[in-house]
Image (cartoon, helix red, strand yellow):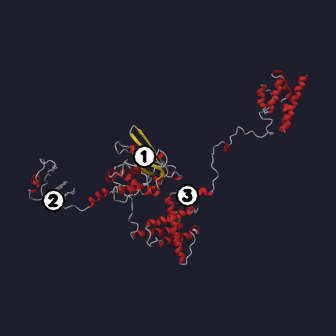
Amino acid sequence: MAAEMEDDVHLSQIAAEIEEDIQLSEVATEIEDDIKLAVCSQEIEADYFDDLAISQAANIMDVNLTISQAMNVYDVEGEENFDLGTFELGYLAREPNTSGVENPMNTGINRFSTCVSADEIDKLITSQTNPNTQKNTKWAIKVFNEWRAARRQNGVEITDLLTMDVNTMDYWLQRFVLEARKKTGDEYPPKSLYYIVCGLMRHCKDNKLFHVNFFDEKDGTFAQFRKVLDARMKYLLAKGLGTKQKKADAISEEDEEMLWSSGVFGQSNSTTLQYTVFYYACKMFGLRGRDEHRNLQCSQFELGEDGKGKYIRFIGRNNKTFNGGLAHMKISNKDIKHYSNDGPRCMYNIFETYLNMLGNDGCFYRKPLAMVGNTIRYGKQPLGVNKLEGLMKEMCQKAGLTGNYTNHSGKRTCATALYKAGLDEQTIMDRTGHRSSAVRAYKSKTDEIEQKVSSVLNPPSIDTVSVTHNKLEVEGPLLKCTKLEPVNTENSANCRDISTRLKCLNDITNTSGTVNFNNCNFSFT
């Protein structure tokens, strides 16, 4: 009995501590009534534990052992009236246990960036806008504001474009396109005037005037302005403005051979190797002007070999025709394999040498350094923007080529060569990166094609006699034409005298009367 009383005292002390710490008087009362702690303690004492076990149980309770855990420890069989639940008795009295909860701020990994400001958002948008587009917008606004200043000198105050309502904007833009002039006083060509208007509309949209659309034919707000602009462009074209277009020339096969034979291309030093890589990066992968070359990285080129031979793989990123934005979700970046031919001009070997000299890492175009012995070297500094922009012109001048050669000549050479080879248009567009019929601008505009067309359209030569397929209705018998055998001028034994060659026509020339010719072609040289 003494032992039982001592046990009861221990249990009552534990219950009192739990009630005091957790302030769950109702829970404690419920537990005392339903669980029958006295019976439970007697069963535990009789079946499993002695006095030491009870003291250990008290220690476990001190470290927040849940009732369900205590039941597992004591192996208490569930009874019908022994419905206890799995809650912790000390839940309300202690601080929440967050030891098992991962705190993302303390993991050492900065998953989310710091809070961004409105200025940072604007800078991001601006940084991903095409530089030429930004330049065009600034130019258009400058021309418009200079026109406003000229009007102000004449006593007419015109408000800023962004503060105008649509009716006022329509009114003044009609007058602007008629009065706009270059600084020299000359009229703008039609396309230049159109680009100025596009720049003004882009300026409005950049400043959240999304309802401004000068070219929406379904919207009659700017209908009168469109009529004025259309008439003005037709008038300027009729005056001969904008009829001459200055385009970069493609490099012909003869010119390309001259670049090799003159020593401009090759691997003799760091400059010639860079010239070679630059030109063939344009020609093989359809790279465009300065911007796309400026952002090239060594990691975009992979060298490999498969059953078809050695290849250079180019993995493109953003460019003028693909920027990866919402409008280009269904378009893929360039991923091109170019298989190389073996020999001293093997592009695989040339690109491999160049990439090795760069360490296969970082910027693709770097400043060439003087050779040390036979070692080609490049610095860590990227090639300057202006230097890179004039690279094609520089190498063509060194080879003595004449023409309008720019960095765009490489892309034009790529498309023109593929058209001349008879490849289908989709294959050409995959190489050049074009997404529209604009690629056709490179089709057959070579001097060879122009010469061929000219020879067809020129008047007939007096040294050539040609009878076409048109049937000549003349009197007399229809005589059979004798085929003229070709003359081999290289073998004197087969070469005939002119009088001998003309004997084959005796049946015609010695015949009196009219001769009929039908579906025959004659050529005398």
Q: Which residue is mark 2?
A: 474
Q: Which residue sits furthest bottom?
A: 155
Q: Amino acid at mark 1?
A: Tyr
Residue highlighted by disc 1: 354
Q: Position of residue 255 (x, y in %)?
A: 33, 54
Q: Quadrant of the N terminus?
A: top right
Expressed as whole percent of the image width and height from the top left, the position of residue 303 reads 43, 42
Q: Nearer the viewer, residue 290 or 246?
A: 290
Residue at 35% over, 56% down = 398
Sequence-first tag of 2 and 1: 1
Dot 3 or dot 2, earlier in sequence: 3
Disc 1 is placed on an element classified as helix
The residue mark sitting in front, 3 or 1, is 1
Q: What amino acid type should be assigned to the residue bearing mark 3?
A: Thr
Sequence order check: which comes first, mark 3 or mark 1?
Answer: 3
Q: Residue furthest front?
A: 373
Q: Is residue 181 above or below residue 461?
A: below
The residue tagged 3 is 126
**Structural distance between the alpha carbons of marks 2 and 1:** 73 Å
Q: Residue 83: in sight, yes or no?
A: no
SS type, badge 3? helix
Report the amino acid beneath label 2: Val
